Amino acid sequence: MNIVLLSGGSGKRLWPLSNDVRSKQFIKLFRLSDGSYESMVQRVYRQIRETDPDASVTIATAKSQVSAIRNQLGEHVSVCIEPVRRDTFPAIALASAFLHDRLHVGGEEPVVVCPVDPYVDDAYFEKLKELSDYAAKGGACLTLMGIEPTYPSEKYGYIIPETKDEVSMVREFREKPDLETAENYIKRGGLWNAGVFAFKLSYLLEKAHSLIDFRDYEDLFAKYAALTKISFDYAVAEKEKSIRVLRYAGEWKDVGTWNTMSEVMTERAKGNAIFDDACENVNVVNELDMPILVCGAKNMVIAASGDGILVADKHQSAYMKPYVEKISEPVHFAEKSWGSYTVIDAGCGYLNVKVDLRPGNRMTYHSHEYRREVWTVLSGTGTAVVDGVKTQIGPGDVVKMPAGAKHTVIAESEMIILECQIGENISVKDKTKYPYEGVVDPGIAKADRE
């Protein structure tokens, strides 16, 4: 089974844990039996592997999410990188060309496309295998998965099938309706459109070539920024005559808001939280190194991180996006392929960051034009490299990098480093990367780096 997982979107509705760097699918909120936590992308990827160990999984994502994907899923996961965001049709076209030209998937092979972040049980992935089998057999150009509605929702588009059979040809698509119209759609056998569909690879490539002028993956990648933003539904699905839908009646939740996320959290709180006996239906997610005390609250969600604090009625939390968009603070936490960083303190001319570097990993070899940096090793051992000079470092050691110096650090054990950035123009854009000892960073092909 060839699966393309669409990992897009920025973090607005799960603020302050999600942001433009850490989207909702990377937040670790689902507790495992061993006491650790996994994110949505880790959960879905694990469920696919448990259902079909031989599945070929490619994640289609923006450049800004690659580090988090590498951090959470490892260096060897297949990633198709969008140079810029251009909505779902260009993303799927690029991923299809990537499968054909980079992974050498044959044109007659079926491909299943689905979002990376649904909360589902294992039956969902068994249904994906059915979807793949239907696509392989032909009989329709596209095969969709339609979710059996559990209530008349105004949040989803609807697929109206010709019959109420398990598999049916599609009569029409409908946009997000009002409540009365949604009830009517359900009476007609309407299904939620969850953005899950399958096709033979050759079909999608032919469709892409008919709508976009490109030769191959490399050419499409080079032209990607000039493509029109358009969804797959508008560009392809709603115009396709030969299309059928497979019903799915198992567990499926779109956990896009704190309200729906709290429904699937297995515990009342993650992090340091204290509740009095008067609290009812309250969830707390606390990433700060200090306790949160909640007294007498009802039907609320409280979330705290280095980026801010949310205190909201659960229902009202679904409508917070326009208010979050008014917040222009820089991101205080991000996962990288080598570990993570957390902004501790910032002021005029300085920025203090805690760097957590995983064993056997290193930062990119890079320099800064407008700032100098000082590293203080708090724990762990490794090797600092400054302008090609290697130095063994451990707890208490200090490394100074003047502006313009090429530098990196290679961790032998897990390292915690306090990084002080000093300069009048501190910016994430002030960074020039270099090959280290002639070796390009793993997992990113030449076209994907440009």
Image (spheres, grey):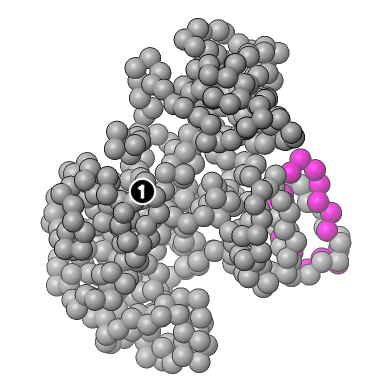
What residue is rendered at 31% in x and 66% in y?
232
**Residue 290 among those drawn in magenta:** yes
**Picture coordinates of residue 205, whole percent (x, y):** 18, 57
What residue is rendered at 55% in x and 50% in y?
20
The residue carrying mark 1 is 82
**Picture coordinates of residue 141, whole percent (x, y):** 18, 69
Bounds of the magenta segment: 277-294
Q: Classify residue 418 by image quadrant.
A: top right
**Picture coordinates of residue 395, whole percent (x, y):** 68, 14
Placement of 168 over or under 112, stated as above or below: below
Placement of 397 over or under 338, stated as above or below: above
Q: Residues within 10 Å of mark 1 (few under 14, many from 20)?
A: many
Q: Is residue 71 left or right of residue 159?
A: right
**Residue 206 among those drawn in magenta:** no
What residue is rendered at 40% in x and 34% in y?
75
Q: Classify residue 211 by image quadrant.
A: bottom left
